[in-house]
Image: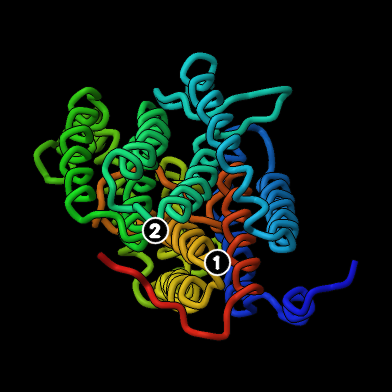
Amino acid sequence: MGTTPEEVETKGRKSDRVLLVSVILLMMFGSLAVYSSIAYFAQSHGTSAGSLVTGHIFKLGIAFFVMLIVSKIEYSNLAKLSRYAVIISWILLVAVMIYGDLVFGARRSLSVGGFSFQPSSFAAVALILHLAVLICKKQEYIKDFKNSFLPIMIWVSITCLLIAMEDFSSAALLMGICLCMMFVGRMSMLQLSSIILIGIIGGSALILSSAERQSRVMQYVGQITEIKNDRFESAAGYQAQQAHIAIAQGQLFGVGIGQSTQRDFLPAPYNDFIFAIIAEEYGMVGSLAIILIFGLILIRGIGHIARNARDLLGTLIALGATLMITLYGFVNAAVATGLFPVTGLPMPFISYGGTSMLFAGVMIGLLLNISKHSSSNEKKFYIG
């Protein structure tokens, strides 16, 4: 069979280099930050910081390899498998609630053969892909309540609800991303407004059902202060206080690489509060550099890749993938600086981890693939 003109043209195109370089910079910066923040954790667990950082770099390498593989696969072919991926993610999320590892009072990961992973990350990628497929298929009657809105919301609601059972923050963020995708996909504003209202009511119910969530929210608005053993020990309050101390010590240029003192006091400084360690060691300059890189990814992903995608499917996938990567980064930074209550969301390619990093690589791979197939003509967004 001969090669079509479209395939020839696609082969001559390259993926978005600005996006690729931005991700590589985050990975490099993250390796240094993890090395600085994980020393106390390594010592308390009878291992060395070097071995943990080596493991982190190895996981980054896997994520980068997966990213390159995904960037070579036609995104529409991956989208065809999204329905089955979402169903599998439901099974895994239910399994987590029953057999998951209990860490800090929550079950978010499964361990199989010594390998631990978080199904919520897989579920998020699968839902973004499948939501894009559903919106594209129903474009001719996208505002119809029975044939469009209800079928789409069944997939979105079940996935977000299963994630919210143990990880409310991730579920809320995923729901917000889905709403943005549905807005761009021209779904009815009245229907989207009803989702927001139901989401507020449901979110409030989930918060009230958990003492830990209530504590985080109340601490955020300054209504509780708990003193134990002469230390500020409110779970969320203590974390936020130590993060603020770290940021304050960093000032403009930081205390220097590896010179952090708050890593010995911050819970999970290599993950949830890694931005505070970056602010302490690299100062405001280093912190702004990280924020600017995520901002560049946001602009590149939406303003260029999503805008110039060859079809609506590519636009929606690019939009969802970009928001997933950048919002996680911004929320992590906002928690460390006290703008948001404690959420436990990692910073993509910066925080120490495995599953979240792997699927962040999948998201970037999708963006690189869509950029390779972008149209030279500007694509209009449909809003209504």
* Side of 307 relative to 370 (left or right): left
Classify mark 2: helix, strand or loop. helix
Give the residue displayed 60% in from the left and 42% down from the top: 355
Residue 242 is marked as: none
Give the residue displayed 34% in from the left and 53% down from the top: 142
Front: mark 1 or 2: 2
Q: Nearer the viewer, residue 21 or 380?
A: 380
Place residue 210 in its image quadrant: top left
Give the residue displayed 37% in from the left and 50% down from the top: 178
Direction right: furthest residue? 1
Q: Position of residue 74 (x, y in %)?
A: 69, 60
User: Can you identify the residue that label 2 sits on?
Assistant: 327
Residue type, numbered disc 2:
Leu
User: Can you identify the residue that label 1 sits on?
Assistant: 257
Q: Are marks 1 and 2 in contact (CB under 8 Å)?
A: no
Could you classify mark 2 by the number of other residues whose Cα lies within 10 Å: few (under 14), some (14-19), or many (20 or more)? many
Quarter of the image containing the N terminus?
bottom right
Separation of residues labelled 1 and 2 (CA atoms): 26 Å
Q: Position of residue 370 (x, y in %)?
A: 60, 68
